[in-house]
Structure formats: structure tokens, C-alpha cells
């Protein structure tokens, strides 16, 4: 749609007359556009239903199918965020434990750049991280527990500050803490090296931001990449020029990261819920094939086999 203002009625007429979209219930369409907005709904979820050449919708595509894909993506964000928050909670706990085990409970320790691994390349980033940590615990604070510890004890231990830190900050702390501390933390996750854990946390943090900001998730793609894992090989994911084509920078890469960072029973629950969402949206979108949806998500056709190949 152009930047010209259109009423809801005009938006619906445009979809019917110019784009050949089937709309049988104009009242439902108008109420939906009012709730979600044309830009969020049509702009965000129309592409899988359109012919690439003409830009028109495939014959028979209905307004309800686009709505179904929109709500699938909403439920997808809720599902991924639930398990990412579990990983975040666990990661915050073990990072604060092992950092304080080595350096103690005083805030000056995690605010000291010398307690991180400094190199000519990352010194600026470490100081930037420390500055962000300082701002997080500075008064006045919107966090009552930080205000309480700062006023009563003159100190905000890392395990207290952790609750206020973003996953991005957590990922950076892990990236720059000394190798011996990284090693103790990564040992809590079977089959995960220090470097792999950093890469997993980076991808997880990017996905968390996408979920938290309500951005489109099913076609998630990022610049960062996760490492090659045994799961890539076991799933026989196609390679091009020696590189895996799926499960590296897409939503399936997040699934792989979750697989390595949660317990098996929890991952089984996640996979069951994910499979149910995919089945549901395909039932509600007859003009969206399973192959097409999985391709958009970066999932291999045998993606569900990951549950029996876990790690």
C-alpha cells in the first residue's frame, strides 16, 4: 500500500479489486484491520500467499488465511520466548555464581574492566559493557531491589543486578569473562564448548529481541551464525560450498540452540508445542504448503527428527 491514507473500507476494496484477495466477511476484515493495522497484517504476512511475478494473491487465497498466519507468528513468539526466558534465567544464575565465586560479591568487581579478558580488539567493547552495567545499578533506579541494596548495603551484588540486565548484556558478560570462568559455566551444558555457548547465547539474544518487540518471527534471519553441530550432520542438512544451508542463521538455528541449552524433557515439550502450531496454521492456510512454510522458517523437511537425535 502507498503512503496515501485509505479508510478501512478503501483498504478492503483495494485488496479485493486490485489484489484479487477473497474477502467474504467485510465486517470481520474491517474489525481485524482496526485491531492489527494494514501495515502489520498485510504488509508483514502477505508474501507467502502471492505470486512473485504479478504481485497478486494466488487464486482462492482468503483474508482469513493471512490472519491465521499472523496469529501463528504471534503464538510462535510466545512459545519461543517462554523457553528463551528459561535459558536466560539459568544462564544468569550460573554466570553470577561462577563470577562471584572467583571475584567475590562486591559490585566493584564486575565493574572492573581488569576482571574481563582484555585484548587490543575488544577493550572498547569491555569498557562499553562495564559502563552499561554501571548505568543499570545507578540511582535513582526503577528497580526497587537495586535501590534497596544500594541504600542499605552500599553494594549491589552481581546476583542482584542480574535481574535487571538484558540478555544482550548477559551474552557480553559471558563473551568477555576469563576463560576459566567460561569453562565452568559451559560445563553446565553437556556437549557445549565455551565458544559454542557464546554463539548460542548470541543467537538466542537476537531471537529474544525479535519476540519481545513483536517483530515477525517465522522468517527470522540474522547476520550472526551458530556453529556446526552434530545435529546438522545427523539431520543430513544440505550443504553448499561446504556450508550448511539451514540451521545456521534462521529460526531453526534457534531451535538447535534451545536443544543444547535446555533439558531433554523440556525440549520435548517445546517440540510438541511447536509441531502443533505448524499443523494448526497449515490447516488454516490451504494455500500455504508445508514445504513453503518450512523453507521460510529455515527448517529442513525432517526437522522433527531432532527430538530423537538430541545432542
Image (cartoon, grey):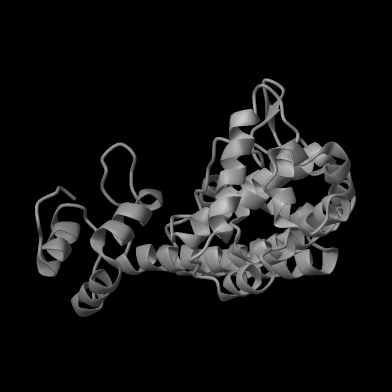
Is 234 positioned to the left or the right of 28 in the image?
right
Residue at 56 percent of width and 39 percent of height? 128
| Residue 239 image position (x, y, % from top left) | 70, 29
Q: Nearer the viewer, residue 302 or 167?
A: 167
Q: Nearer the viewer, residue 307 or 117?
A: 117
Q: Nearer the viewer, residue 70 or 170?
A: 170
| Residue 205 image position (x, y, % from top left) | 60, 51
* Residue 250 occupies quadrant: top right
As displayed, is residue 35 above or below residue 201? below
| Residue 4 image position (x, y, % from top left) | 9, 51
Residue at 50 percent of width and 61 percent of height? 212
As displayed, is residue 306 above or below residue 32? above
As displayed, is residue 199 above or below residue 280? above
Q: Nearer the viewer, residue 112 or 62?
A: 112
| Residue 86 image position (x, y, % from top left) | 70, 66
Q: Is residue 155 visible?
A: yes
Q: Is residue 294 visible?
A: no
Is 27 positioned to the left or the right of 203 in the image?
left
Q: How many marks?
A: 0
Residue at 81 percent of width and 39 percent of height? 178
Residue at 24 percent of width and 61 percent of height? 38
Amino acid at each position: 500500500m502507498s503512503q496515501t491514507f485509505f479508510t478501512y473500507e478503501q483498504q478492503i476494496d483495494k485488496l479485493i479489486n486490485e489484489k484479487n484477495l477473497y474477502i467474504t466477511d467485510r465486517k470481520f476484515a474491517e474489525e481485524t484491520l482496526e485491531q492489527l493495522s494494514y501495515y502489520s497484517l498485510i504488509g508483514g504476512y502477505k508474501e507467502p500467499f502471492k505470486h512473485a511475478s504479478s504481485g497478486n494473491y494466488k487464486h482462492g487465497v482468503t483474508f482469513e488465511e493471512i490472519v491465521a498466519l499472523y496469529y501463528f507468528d504471534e503464538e510462535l513468539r510466545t512459545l519461543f520466548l517462554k523457553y528463551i526466558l528459561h535459558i536466560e534465567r539459568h544462564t544468569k544464575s550460573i554466570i553470577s555464581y561462577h563470577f562471584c565465586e572467583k571475584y567475590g560479591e562486591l559490585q566493584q568487581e564486575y565493574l572492573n574492566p581488569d576482571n574481563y579478558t582484555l585484548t587490543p580488539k575488544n577493550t572498547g567493547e569491555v569498557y562499553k559493557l562495564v559502563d552499561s552495567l554501571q548505568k543499570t545499578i545507578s540511582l535513582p533506579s526503577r528497580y526497587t531491589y537495586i535501590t534497596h541494596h544500594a541504600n542499605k548495603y552500599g553494594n549491589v551484588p552481581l546476583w542482584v543486578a542480574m535481574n535487571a540486565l538484558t540478555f544482550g548484556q548477559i551474552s557480553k558478560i559471558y563473551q568477555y569473562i576469563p576463560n576459566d570462568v567460561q569453562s565452568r559455566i559451559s560445563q553446565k551444558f553437556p556437549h557445549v564448548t565455551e565458544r559454542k555457548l557464546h554463539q548460542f547465547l548470541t543467537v538466542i539474544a537476537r531471537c529474544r529481541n525479535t519476540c519481545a518487540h513483536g517483530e515477525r518471527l517465522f522468517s527470522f534471519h540474522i547476520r550472526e551464525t551458530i556453529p556446526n553441530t552434530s545435529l546438522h550432520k545427523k539431520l543430513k542438512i544440505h550443504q553448499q560450498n561446504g556450508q550448511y544451508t539451514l540451521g545456521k542463521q534462521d529460526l531453526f538455528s534457534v531451535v538447535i540452540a534451545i536443544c543444547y541449552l535446555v533439558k531433554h524433557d523440556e525440549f520435548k515439550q517445546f517440540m510438541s508445542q511447536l509441531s502443533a502450531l505448524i499443523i494448526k496454521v497449515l490447516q488454516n492456510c490451504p494455500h500455504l504448503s508445508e514445504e513453503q512454510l518450512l523453507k521460510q522458517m529455515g527448517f529442513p523437511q525432517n526437522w522433527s527428527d531432532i527430538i530423537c537425535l538430541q545432542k
